[in-house]
Image (cartoon, helix red, strand yellow):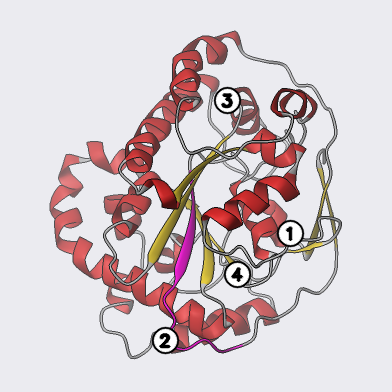
Amino acid sequence: MSGLSVTPALAPRPERGAPGRRPQVIYIMGAGRSGSSVLGITLGNCTNVFFAGELDNWLLRSGRPQLEDSERSRFWDGVRAELEDEPGASELFGSETQRSIERSISLFRVHRWPARHRLRRRYRAIAEDLYRALTRVTGVVHIVDSSHYPLRARELQRLSGIDLHLVFLVRDPQDVAASFNRRDVNEYNKSTFHTNVYLWLTHLLSMLVFLRHPRERRLLVRYEDFLGDPQDIVRQILDHSGCADAPPADLTALAIGFPLQGNRVTRSSTLSLKVHSDPLPSSRLTAVLQAPLMMALSRLRPAATAKDGETRRGASTAERTCASS
């Protein structure tokens, strides 16, 4: 594994508290395999921040975590208990909301438009209730959701009971394509062509959602900048999310915590964030198809800035083989 090393250890269990406080949701948006799990884990190691993982899977998995070890199961059982008295949650358990509302491809599934209209109100209510339950169980108000779907972010923008902070995470498309092309890990894969189509659709939708969000609650982050100077980029994300009192995490031993679901790095207990130069073959097709999109993304503001962007982007071709959700 390049870029990240994972070692076993016990993660601390969040304490209960903070009843009635307004959730501050840090939503990591963008394409899959862009590093959302790694960024989410890093943020979750900061004071007063909880990394919840991919919460789009909460309804899909009926509120049960991807890994059912005793500590993680106990935590999410506690979250489910907080929602037992809330109407309608169990009625939406399953894949229908994800397929009809959250996935980008749902826009083209005309036969699912009636379901989207029928489910949307209950879906939004349950999403808000889930964030509130997490603030009560964890005792913190800053909840990191790494679901990454732009259409989920669009629905969250309409919730009146939370403050939504968007982090639009962008990774070098060559690295994303290489990650989707891998056959040596237990993750779903795509061809180079399908990855490029997916990146265009996801990034276009993400840009639209990003630009319609209040400027003071949105931030573009390049994964290469984050990996090159994680403490500085995390500091900027925290400042932008109203969590300025939280110190940067100790990057030598990041506790995974209890995310509901994520990529394979979340299946261990700790993560050590390290940068290694590990070049991979590049795709001319990807370079040509993604060039206009990368130019458009480079103009989005506000954007987190590394102290030495060019040097860091060149040095941090790392983490290519550790696919992130």
Q: Name the secondary structure under disc 3.
A: helix
Q: Earlier in the sequence, mark 1 or mark 2?
A: 2
- Residues 264 and 310: in front is 310
Question: Which percent across, then down, holds residue 4?
Answer: 81, 46
Q: Kindly report which numbered mark, 2 or 3, lies closer to the viewer in this rendering.
A: 2
Residue 314, quarter of the rendered image? top right
Three-letter amino acid code of the residue under disc 3: Pro
C-alpha gap between disc 4 and disc 1: 14 Å
Three-letter amino acid code of the residue under disc 2: Gly
> Which residue is the site of mark 3?
173
Q: Earlier in the sequence, mark 2 or mark 4?
A: 2
Q: Earlier in the sequence, mark 2 or mark 3?
A: 2
Q: Are marks 4 and 1 in contact (CB under 8 Å)?
A: no
Q: Which mark is residue 20?
A: 2
Q: Are marks 4 and 3 in contact (CB under 8 Å)?
A: no
Question: Which percent across, then down, holds residue 324?
Answer: 64, 44
Question: Which percent across, then down, holds residue 265?
Answer: 71, 53
Q: Earlier in the sequence, mark 4 or mark 1?
A: 4
Three-letter amino acid code of the residue under disc 4: Phe
In this rendering, position of residue 29 left or right of residue 139: left
Q: Name the secondary structure under disc 4.
A: strand
C-alpha gap between disc 2 and disc 4: 17 Å
> Which residue is the site of mark 4?
50
Task: Assess whether residue 20 is covered by the magenta stretch.
Answer: yes
Which stretch appears magenta? 16-29
Q: Are marks 1 and 3 in contact (CB under 8 Å)?
A: no
278, above or below 81, in the image:
above
